Image (cartoon, helix red, strand yellow):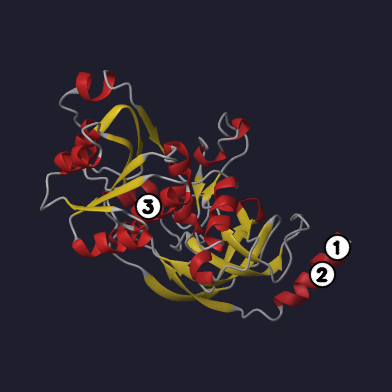
Amino acid sequence: HPRLLYHLQKIEMAAVPKTMKALVKTAEQESYELQEIPVPEPQKGELLVKVTRASICGSDIALYKWNEVAKVIATVPFTPGHECVGEIVAVGPDCAPEFTVGKRVCCENHYYCGNCYQCNNDLKHICQNMKQYGHGRGTVHGGCSQYTIIPASYAYLLQTDIDDDKACILEPFGVAHQAMEALCPEKDTVLVQGCGPIGLFSIGICKAMGASKILAVDVFDEKLQTAKGFGADVLINGKKENLKEAVLRETGGDGIGRLVEATGVPFMVNNSFSLLRKGGRIVLIGLPRAPLHVENVLTDIVFRSITIKTVHGRKIFSSWEKSEALISRNK
């Protein structure tokens, strides 16, 4: 009976401490503060989750510095940390029956409204009225705390026993997975620009999806060696080698069939279209901080008849399910 279950949950809450440590952003300046604050109590449709692991995204650094990017994506006050995993310790009223104490969940940090055009057309991840966990948008909660509140609607129930280190990266991994689904790398040659976390995930996913050859470019040799471990076949240091010449060499002069732009560096984005073969496909994941300029629009874009894709977030919840399945199989 729902009332009895909720009463039992209230008893469970007695075992949860009254206060917890949390990182808090309280001012629009370079700062995070470690504070002792009350443990929140789950309200209607909410879960109280004991955080067991959280990872740091590049945006968390931007939020700390409170740079121009932070001013666009966040609202003070809030607790940072949108990549996390934890265990349900209390369930508020009116949550679906599958959410029970002891189960492990991650947070889909794109809080969708459920009413806009996108939400009504299976595009919740790019909701017009999106709020965001860990950014102070629609919630003050985040994963850099001992306990956190996650609405059950945005909680992803883990389906396997992958460990917390792997579970807490499902959020960024899901971004790469959605991008690679849009890229369609099977039996094609892929160039991944930028060997940060998203670029590395993209390499591994492309390999698992059956790419015939993967080229990786970066300006740091240590990152390129990591890329090799993820499945890259050809390593290109952009400071030491001409990228276009390398691409033409590795593709028999055709140009690259599939390109992942994960640097966000305007020059790299601008140059990437000229690397594609005619009929090729590119997905933009990196976040440019300056205007883009393509010198030869006709020859590099229009006459190439290329497909340009962009991504934001993960498909809810199919990207999570596919990503967890891939990681659990150690692919």
Side (left or right) of 49 relative to 233: right
Q: Is residue 175 placed above or below 12 in the rendered structure?
A: above
Q: Nearer the viewer, residue 257 or 159?
A: 257
Under circle 3, the secondary element is helix
Instruction: Please state which amino acid type lies under the numbered disc 3.
Output: Ile
Where residue 27 sits, quadrant-wise, is: bottom left
Instruction: Please state which amino acid type lies under the numbered disc 2.
Output: His
Q: Is residue 284 placed above or below 6 in the rendered structure?
A: above
Side (left or right) of 204 relative to 322: left
Residue 203's tag is: 3
The residue at the point 58 percent across, 32 percent down is: 116
Discs 3/1, front = 3
Residues under numbered marks 2 and 1 in contact, where contact means CB atoms less than 8 Å apart: yes
- Picture quarter with the N terminus: bottom right
Where residue 8 sits, quadrant-wise, is: bottom right
Q: CA distance from mark 3 to mark 1?
A: 49 Å
Residue 40 seen in this snapshot: no
The residue at the point 60 percent across, 30 percent down is: 121
Q: Which residue is mark 2?
A: 7
The residue at the point 57 percent across, 67 percent down is: 162
Query: Going from the N terminus, do you reach mark 2 or mark 3 first?
Result: 2
Q: Position of residue 251 (x, y in %)?
A: 25, 38
Q: Which residue is mark 1?
A: 3
Q: Is residue 117 placed above or below 186 in the rendered structure?
A: above
Q: Position of residue 193 (x, y in %)?
A: 27, 47
Side (left or right) of 215 relative to 231: left
Crowd rating for badge 3 (residues with CA inside 10 Å; few <14, some 14–19, many 20+) = many
The residue at the point 39 percent across, 33 percent down is: 309
Residues under numbered marks 3 and 1 in contact, where contact means CB atoms less than 8 Å apart: no
Q: CA distance from mark 2 to mark 3?
A: 48 Å
Side (left or right) of 248 relative to 179: left
Discs 2/3, front = 3
